[in-house]
Amino acid sequence: MLEQAERMRREFFRPAPRGGRTAWHPPVDVFETERDLWLVVALPGVPVDRVQVRVEGGTVIVSGERPLPAAVREAQVHRLEIPQGRFERRLELPAGRFRVDRHEMVDGCLVLSLARVP
């Protein structure tokens, strides 16, 4: 059980780039069409106002925080598998320039549409 917990910790919690705070990395699906790049970022329980999205050069950065629900902050924890706290995910984009066209939370996932800039 300890090995499994350690493997999960290594998978989700990695130091943030540039000496930042430790952050977990949400899983992402990426789809590409002729005009768009779609990213689906799994962020269960994360309010949309706690998510920041930016494009820097050839990288899209999704960051924010998943707070522990207030109702359970004083509770005894029996299992905690869904990461809490600060998250950040950096993804290299395909060649070309992109801008964030749309983003919305759908069924616990952030759905991003990045439009190609001519």
Image (tube, rainbow, N blue to C red):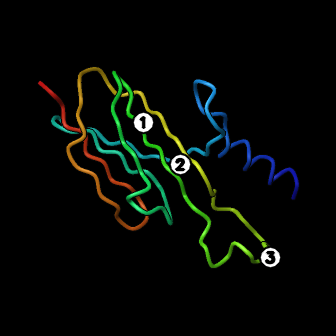
Three-letter amino acid code at the position of disc 1: Ile
Alpha carbon separation for disc pair 2 and 3: 25 Å
Alpha carbon separation for disc pair 3 and 1: 34 Å
Alpha carbon separation for disc pair 1 and 2: 12 Å
Question: Crowding at label 3, few (<14), some or many (≥20) Cα neighbours within 10 Å?
Answer: few
| Marks 3 and 1 in Cβ contact (< 8 Å) | no
Residue 36 in percent (x, y) is at 21, 39
Question: Crowding at label 1, few (<14), some or many (≥20) Cα neighbours within 10 Å?
Answer: some
| Comes first in the chain, label 3 or label 1 | 1
Q: Residue furthest right?
A: 2
Q: Residue furthest left?
A: 118
Three-letter amino acid code at the position of disc 2: Pro
Question: From the image, which quarter does the C terminus lie in?
Answer: top left
| Comes first in the chain, label 2 or label 3 | 2
> Circle 2 sits in a helix, a strand or a loop, which is it?
loop
Residue 50 in percent (x, y) is at 44, 55
Residue that label 1 marks? 61
Residue that label 2 marks? 26
User: Which of the 4 image quadrants contains residue 100?
Assistant: top left
In the rendered picture of this protein, how many numbered marks are placed on residues?
3
Q: Nearer the viewer, residue 17 or 113?
A: 17
Residue 74 in percent (x, y) is at 74, 75
Residue that label 3 marks? 76
